[in-house]
C-alpha cells in the first residue's frame, strides 16, 4: 500500500475508499500481505485524469467497471494517440433519436440548461468525450464553480 500511495500521490484512506466504492478492485491478499499491482496504479491515474475533467465518482465508476486492465492502460496512452481509438469506443451516429423504453442514460452537465446525455451501455465513450466535456464546461464558465 505504501508504494502505491507514493507512486499515485493518493492517500491510503482514499485508496481504501475507492476500493469500497468499486472504483478499484481489491488487492490480492489482505492486511500487510495485500498486493497491489500496476493495474491499481493505472486505474488510480485514470481516476485522477477523469476527476480533473470534473467527472463525478459515480460516472468514473460506470466508466471503469467494464474496462479491462489493458483498456485502462490504453486510455492512459500518450496524448498524440486519440483516446477514442485507444479505448476502442465511439458514439454511434446512426443511433435512433428516440430512446427505447427502459434505456438508462448518464447525464453530463455542461452548463446551466446545457447537458450531454450518453446511453449507459456507451459509457466507455465518456473517456473519449471527457476532454470535450471539460472544454465545453470551460467555454460556458462552469468549471470555475467546481
Image (spheres, helix red, strand yellow):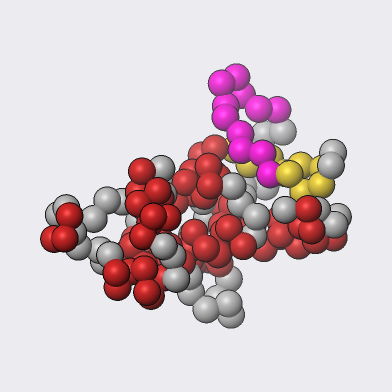
Residue at 53%, 42% in the rendered image: 58
Residue 88 screen position, x and y as percent: 49, 59
- Residue 30: image x %, image y %? 16, 53
Q: Quadrant of residue 103?
A: top right
Which region of the structure is painted magenta?
A: 98-108
The answer to which of 96 and 47 lies nearer the viewer is: 47
88 lies above or below 111: below
Q: Position of residue 91 (x, y in %)?
A: 62, 50
Most common secondary structure along the magenta stretch = loop
For this rendering, which residue is in front, 3 or 79? 3
Q: Which residue is rendered at x = 47% and y = 46% of the image? A: 61
Q: Quadrant of the N terminus?
A: bottom left
Left or right? Give the position of 58 relative to 66: right
**x, y percent for residue 136:** 79, 57
Residue 73 appears in view: no
Q: Is residue 48 left or right of residue 96?
A: left
Amino acid at each position: 500500500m505504501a508504494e502505491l500511495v507514493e507512486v499515485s500521490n493518493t492517500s491510503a484512506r482514499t485508496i481504501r475508499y475507492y476500493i469500497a466504492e468499486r472504483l478499484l478492485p481489491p488487492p490480492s491478499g489482505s492486511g500487510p500481505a495485500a498486493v497491489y499491482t500496476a493495474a491499481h496504479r493505472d486505474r488510480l491515474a485514470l481516476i485522477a485524469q477523469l476527476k480533473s475533467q470534473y467527472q463525478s465518482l459515480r460516472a468514473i465508476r460506470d466508466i471503469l467497471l467494464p474496462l479491462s486492465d489493458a483498456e485502462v492502460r490504453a486510455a492512459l496512452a500518450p496524448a498524440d494517440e486519440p483516446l477514442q481509438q485507444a479505448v476502442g469506443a465511439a458514439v454511434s451516429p446512426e443511433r435512433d433519436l428516440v430512446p427505447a423504453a427502459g434505456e438508462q442514460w448518464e447525464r453530463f452537465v455542461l452548463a446551466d440548461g446545457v447537458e450531454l446525455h450518453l446511453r449507459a451501455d456507451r459509457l466507455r465513450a465518456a473517456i473519449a468525450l471527457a476532454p470535450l466535456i471539460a472544454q465545453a464546461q470551460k467555454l460556458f464558465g462552469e468549471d470555475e464553480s467546481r
